[in-house]
């Protein structure tokens, strides 16, 4: 019994094989990245109902509370919102993911007159101590509605 031999394919040089391999890896990584959902971060609007943003300053990551540094908080910003007779502080920390922002809500040390929530990959601390108790819930709801990613259009700023 004789075996028929197939014609051999032309061999590629090692440099061309390497290029093909690198191209395949680049295509794979590009496809993988396109499948990863974009992380949504919170933007602070200029106005929240009757409240006007009077200041906004970036925070130094070394000043972040320990609980947030352990969760690898990346950026932070503090804003002040003023109405006719009072001021509210809003601090937003950009977390690596929505999961770590949720964990921040669970583990952040509680303070009187502060409210905490997660929105996308952001962890938010609202200092509402200067507001009368009856005005806190309405401000909190307005803040949540007005802030992006799923609130007001950030281009309105």
Image (spheres, grey):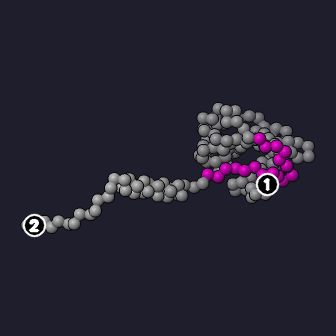
Residue drawn 32% across the image and 58% down it: 12
Residue drawn 70% across the image and 36% down it: 60
Q: What stretch is highlighted in magenta?
A: 39-57
Which image quadrant for residue 13?
bottom left
In the shown orientation, is residue 59 left or right of residue 87? Answer: left
Q: Percent position (x, y) of residue 32?
A: 49, 55
Label 2: which secondary element: loop
Residue named by callout 2 = 2
Residue drawn 77% across the image and 48% down it: 140
Q: Percent position (x, y) of residue 20?
A: 39, 57
Residue drawn 77% across the image and 41% down it: 57
In the shown orientation, is residue 124 left or right of residue 20? Answer: right
Foreground residue, 3 or 37?
A: 3
Q: Can residue 148 be seen in this view?
A: yes
Q: Percent position (x, y) of residue 51?
A: 85, 49
Quarter of the C terminus within the rendering = bottom right
Q: Percent position (x, y) of residue 49?
A: 84, 53
Quarter of the N terminus within the rendering = bottom left
Residue named by callout 1 = 157
Task: Work out how far the residue at label 1 is from the one at label 2, CA to CA, in angstroms.
Answer: 81 Å
């Amino acid at each position: 019994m004789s075996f028929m031999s197939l014609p051999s394919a032309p061999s590629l040089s090692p440099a061309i094989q390497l290029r093909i391999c690198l191209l395949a890896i680049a295509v794979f990584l590009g496809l993988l990245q396109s499948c990863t959902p974009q992380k949504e971060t919170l933007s602070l609007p200029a106005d929240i109902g009757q409240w006007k943003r009077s200041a906004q300053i970036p925070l130094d990551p070394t000043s972040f509370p320990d609980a947030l540094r352990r969760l690898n908080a990346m950026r932070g910003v503090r804003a002040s919102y003023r109405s006719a007779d009072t001021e509210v502080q809003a601090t937003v920390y950009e977390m690596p993911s929505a999961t770590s922002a949720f964990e921040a809500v669970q583990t952040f040390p509680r303070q009187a007159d502060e409210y905490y929530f997660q929105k996308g990959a952001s962890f938010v601390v609202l200092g509402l101590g200067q507001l009368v108790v009856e005005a806190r819930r309405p401000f909190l709801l307005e803040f949540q509605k007005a802030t992006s990613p799923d609130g007001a259009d950030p281009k309105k700023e």
